[in-house]
Amino acid sequence: MAEYKIKNFNQDIRKQINTIIEKNLLEGISTKEGIDRIMNYLYSLENYTDKSIDIYREFFMGVVYLDAYKMYAYRQKQGIATEDDIDTFYQLWNIVDFNDLLAEISSNIGLFNTMIKASYDFYNLTGLGKVLVVRSLSLSENKKLSEIFPCHNLDLDTYYETITIDRLVKNIKNQFKYYSKTLMIDFPEGVIYNGVGFIKSLFNIDNSNAKSLCLEIALVDYRAAKYLVNSGEENETLKEHIAFYENNSLEKILSLLGQDSELLFDAIYMLVDLYVNGRYNEIAFNDQVISKAGNEEVVKKLTFDPKQNKE
């Protein structure tokens, strides 16, 4: 029997908000005015006695509250909250249950507007950005949010899945597509810095996952560098990476990948060359051709073993 997975219906509300705002933008209506229209529509539904409409209203309000709390809590913890952000987080923090949330939304138009904008902003984060925001919540915060609106657990199920190199590469490819087709810019460094920032932040909120991901990156970086050097590429950085993986312990490799932004930047750039560009300078390569490259003992050292990564 196939594994059954409950759909995260919170995503539908976020997508709906995004669709409405983006459609309005195409018609020359500002984000603020678009959010005002959504908010006014939700307020107008208070006059309906249809139970299904009442359920929709409450679900919508629950989702935007979750997103606002997550976004403003993250800013607070990162030390980048403005004075207005702190005031907003204070208001969100003081909501104690769902009835309190409904009462606050009913009486505080500005806060409801801010909640909808936060949900729009959360939807438009990269997949990895959403992971950081959700995983930065503490156990007590998750308990509180789940008690106020139990569908918070749907987000926990979605964003607590282990981040693997496949998921990282998928995110990188999506960003390249977005930069090219939507922003119409060629900015690989921006994509790579995003990956560097994600991994360094992941070390702080999920050390075990960060280590397993870095180990996967290291193995690919090592094999690719060995293949390229053996194919005649004379780049000194490649040789330095090979020496780094061959001459250091696993503990030091993981430690430096978590601390040295330049080292991590180069390793992620290798993923871009391999999985996005399919070449390094004039040498074409792929997963298959690099799979046999590298010293057997070093490959074994860099091969992820769940048992050795338990803390």
Image (cartoon, rainbow, N blue to C red):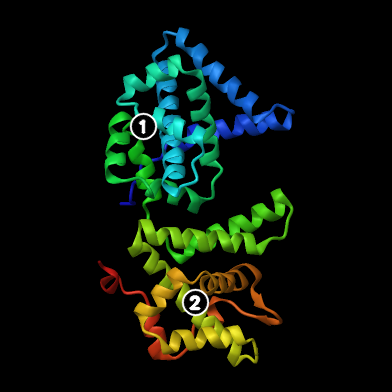
Question: x, y percentage for residue 30?
Answer: 68, 28
The C terminus lies in which quarter of the figure?
A: bottom left
Q: Quadrant of residue 233?
A: bottom right
In the image, is 16 to the left or to the right of 256?
Answer: right
Tell which tag, 1 or 2, sits nearer the viewer: 1
Q: In this view, does 13 lie above or below 204?
A: above
Residue 5 visible to the viewer: no
Residue type pointed to by label 2 = Val
The residue located at (65%, 52%) in the rendering is: 178
Reading the chain from its start, which is encountered first: label 1 or label 2?
1
Mark 2 burial class by Cα count in 10 Å: few <14, some 14-19, many 20+: many
Q: Which mark is residue 220?
A: 2
Asked whether 261 or 18 is in front, the reply is: 261
In the image, is 297 to the left or to the right of 277?
Answer: left
Question: x, y percentage for residue 26?
Answer: 72, 32
Q: Is residue 136 above or below residue 91?
A: below
* Total residue callouts: 2
Q: Which mark is residue 93?
A: 1
Cα distance, mark 1 to mark 2?
43 Å
The residue located at (47%, 85%) in the rendering is: 244
